[in-house]
Structures are given as C-alpha cells and as structure tokens.
Image: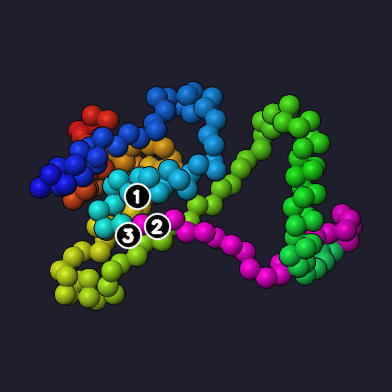
Amino acid sequence: QQQQQQQQHARESVQFPIAESAEAIETTQRDYTQVPQALDNYAERLDDDAALRPTIIQSDGDWNKRFQKSLLKGMATKTINKDEQKDAKDAAFDLLDALTKSGGLPLDHASLHVVVGATHNFDHSLIETLVQDNINPIGKLERSMLIMGLTVHQQHPAELVPPSQQSRLKAELPQLFVSMGRDS
C-alpha cells in the first residue's frame, strides 16, 4: 500500500514543460537531443504498464540519391553507400557551418524536422488482451499517444485532445490530467 501511495504521488507530481504563450514558445530554445530522455522520463512516471519504450531508428544499407546536375538536365539516380553517406552528411554540416559563420548568424527561415520513435508493447497478443485479460487496448494506446504528444509538443494533455473527448480521457487516464492544477 505504501508503494502504491508513492507511485500515486509520483504521478501527481509530474510537471509538464508548458510555455505560457506563443511568444514564450518562439523565444525558448529547446535541446532536441533531450527529447528521448524526456519521453523515457514521462513514460516511466505515467505509463503503469511500462508499455511505451523509446525506439532507436537506424538507416540500413545503401541509399538512392536523386539529383539534377543542372537546371536543363533531367533527373539522375545514384546509389550511395555508407561511406558516401557520411561524406555527404559532413559536407552538409560544413556548408551549414560556413553559412551561419559557426552559429553566429541565425537561420530565421529554416525548419528543422525531428523524428522521435517509440514502440508500444503489449504483454499479450491483441486477442489475448481483449478476451483473456478483458482490457481495452485502445485506452492503453491513447495513454501512449498522449505521453508522446506532451513530450513532443510540450503541452498539457488537455490541449492535445478535443473538448468532446476530455471528460472520457480524464476518467480513464486521470494521472495525465491532474498535474499542474489543470484537472478541469
């Protein structure tokens, strides 16, 4: 019972890194290398089943590069191996370093795309989860999706779901909604 109380207290004390306004979001810089660790921390605190696990995404094998040698020539395709991929990546970072003067100049009109992978594992197959365990797997997946959402978007779960679904999710997943005094 004491362990259950400690787990409940840990769930209730989860803090979400929410910016107060759109202006705060624009001026706040985020260290994207910490996103997997944040996901792991949230999953550890909020996922009772430990079903959500971070996933390492690795590219495999050779790539096909499509390019145009000049504006008037057609598209060409070349297969590049791991060594050529590394050389191309190093050349891209060298160009970025030169264009920004080693980070001294901002890139105001650039966008950064970050891919975060996670895997939701069930203890049993879908049929065993439904029939033998009598557990709705959709609720478990919704919890995992909300944990991913709050980690990636840095918003409270109430801001990530439509108002029509909030009362149902608050009843099913109260540990995600009681933090930061936003249980309304």
**Under tag 2, what secondary structure?**
strand
**Under tag 3, what secondary structure?**
loop
Query: Measuring 22% from the left and 71% from the top, which residue is drawn there?
Result: 129
Find residue 95 and report its image quarter: top right
Q: Is residue 60 magenta?
A: yes
Q: Which residue type carries mark 2? A: Arg
Left or right of 172 in this view: 159: right
The part of the chain drawn in magenta is: 51-73
Residue tagged by mark 2?
A: 53
Left or right of 78 in this view: 174: left
Relative image position of residue 41 (x, y in whole percent)? 38, 45
Of 23 and 151, which appears nearest the observer? Answer: 151
| Circle on res. 65 | none
- Crowd band around label 1 with a 10 angstrom C-alpha radius: few (<14), some (14–19), many (20+): many
Residue tagged by mark 1?
A: 43
Mark 1 and mark 2: span between their CA atoms?
A: 7 Å
Query: Measuring 30% from the left and 67% from the top, which residue is drawn there?
Result: 122
Find residue 103 and report its image quarter: top right
Left or right of 103 in this view: 154: left
Relative vertical location of residue 29 with respect to residue 84 in this rendering, above or below = above
User: Which of the two discs, 1 and 3, labels the residue nearer the N terminus?
Assistant: 1
- Crowd band around label 3 with a 10 angstrom C-alpha radius: few (<14), some (14–19), many (20+): some
Relative vertical location of residue 71 with respect to residue 74 in this rendering, above or below = above
Q: Which residue type carries mark 3? A: Ala
Relative image position of residue 55 (x, y in whole percent)? 47, 59
Residue tagged by mark 3?
A: 51
Q: Is residue 177 magenta?
A: no
